[in-house]
Image (cartoon, rainbow, N blue to C red):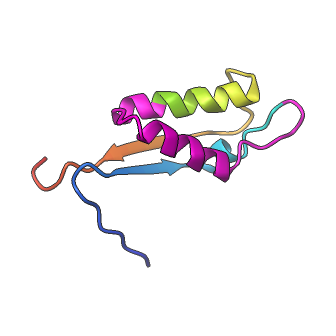
Amino acid sequence: MATESLEPGDCLLLYTDGVTEARTLEGDFFGIERLVDLTNRHASLLLTPESLLRQLVGDVREHTGQDDLADDATVVVVRWEGPGG
């Protein structure tokens, strides 16, 4: 079991393997490195969780060149506002 302490304003990103395994028509995976890089870039813009989610879903669709993916692809972004936030 692992634990992580969150500070107010921190975001948590949860995703299924359908995100990282999304492929181009040539077979290139979206990949974890791309997901981490794009998440960091978008997060540096201080986007709302909803906007960050929309950006990431758009990035996956752009990578595949398709609106519909072959596998389930789920992304959840949660911002911790602190106790009582």
Residue at the image position 72 percent from the left and 39 percent from the top? 22
Q: Identify the magenta region.
A: 25-53
The x and y percentages for residue 78 are 35, 45
Quarter where residue 44 is shown? top left
Q: Quadrant of the N terminus?
A: bottom left
Quarter where residue 66 is shown? top right
Magenta-drawn stretch contains 38: yes
Question: In the drawing, does residue 67 fall left or right of residue 85?
Answer: right
The x and y percentages for residue 8 are 21, 53
Instruction: From this view, report whether residue 37 is shown above or below residue 5.
Output: above
Instruction: From this view, report whether residue 16 is shown above or below residue 24.
Output: below
Question: In the drawing, does residue 32 fall left or right of residue 9?
Answer: right
Question: In the drawing, does residue 66 fall left or right of residue 85?
Answer: right
Magenta-drawn stretch contains 43: yes
The x and y percentages for residue 41 are 51, 40
The x and y percentages for residue 84 are 9, 51
Residue at the image position 61 percent from the left and 39 percent from the top? 73
Question: In the drawing, does residue 35 fall left or right of residue 68?
Answer: left
Return the residue found at the far bottom.
Answer: 1
Residue at the image position 37 percent from the left and 33 percent from the top? 47
Residue at the image position 66 percent from the left and 27 percent from the top? 61
